[in-house]
Amino acid sequence: MSGHDLKTKRAIGVDPGETDDERQGSRHALTAALGSQQPGFDDVVAFLAATPTRLVSVAVEDILALEDQVNVPGTVSEHPNWRRRWPVLLEELAADQRLARIAGTFSRAGRGSPPAS
């Protein structure tokens, strides 16, 4: 929620698609929806998990708290799209406590995988 994505896009000459005021309005709407003064990532995930939508997705880059986007649409050479490495190996991801915490939030909201038969 730092606005890093807007700064990155502006720095490489890409229209971010929203103004700082519009982003601030979105933050206020999120804060109101969550009923929290300073919602954190876990609060947002819990809110998403509780929504009645059938499909919810959380980017692994967000779970791993990566600041830079994996891809900036509309760029070719201005941004290292799809070339950034995660701070954890894929083979280690299943054991990562951040992922386990988010999976637990979704599971408690009734969004876990059905048991294997």
Image (cartoon, rainbow, N blue to C red):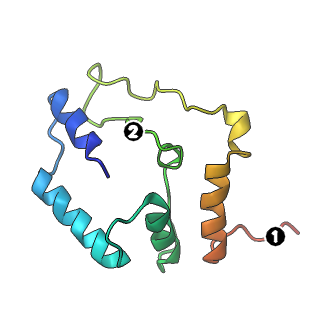
- Viewer-side residue, 107 vs 14: 107
Q: Amino acid at mark 1?
A: Pro
Q: Quadrant of the C terminus?
A: bottom right
Task: Please indicate whether residue 7 sits to the left or right of residue 56 in the image.
Answer: left
Q: Position of residue 50 (x, y in %)?
A: 51, 77
Residue positioned most to the right: 117
The answer to which quarter of the image holds residue 82 is top left
Query: Against 95, is 112 above or below?
Result: below
Amino acid of disc 2: Glu
Q: Which residue is identified by label 1?
A: 115
The residue singled out by tag 2 in the image is 67
Q: Nearer the viewer, mark 1 or mark 2?
A: 2
Query: Relative to 106, is 17 above or below?
Result: above
Residue under the image location 74 percent in, 45 percent down = 95
Q: Is residue 66 above or below residue 84?
A: below
**Sooner in the amino-acid sequence: mark 1 or mark 2:** 2
Classify mark 2: residues with Cα within 10 Å, few (<14), some (14-19) or many (20+): few
Q: Residue lying farthest front?
A: 37
Q: Residue at x 18, y 60 (%)?
A: 24
Q: Residue furthest top?
A: 77
Q: Position of residue 98 (x, y in %)?
A: 61, 51
Discs 1, 2 touching: Cβ within 8 Å = no
Say whether residue 24 is left or right of residue 59: left
Residue drawn at 38 percent across, 28 percent down: 81
Q: Is residue 22 left or right of residue 44?
A: left
Q: Going 31% across and 71% down the picture, which residue do you hit?
A: 37
Residue 17 position in % (x across, y down)? 17, 48
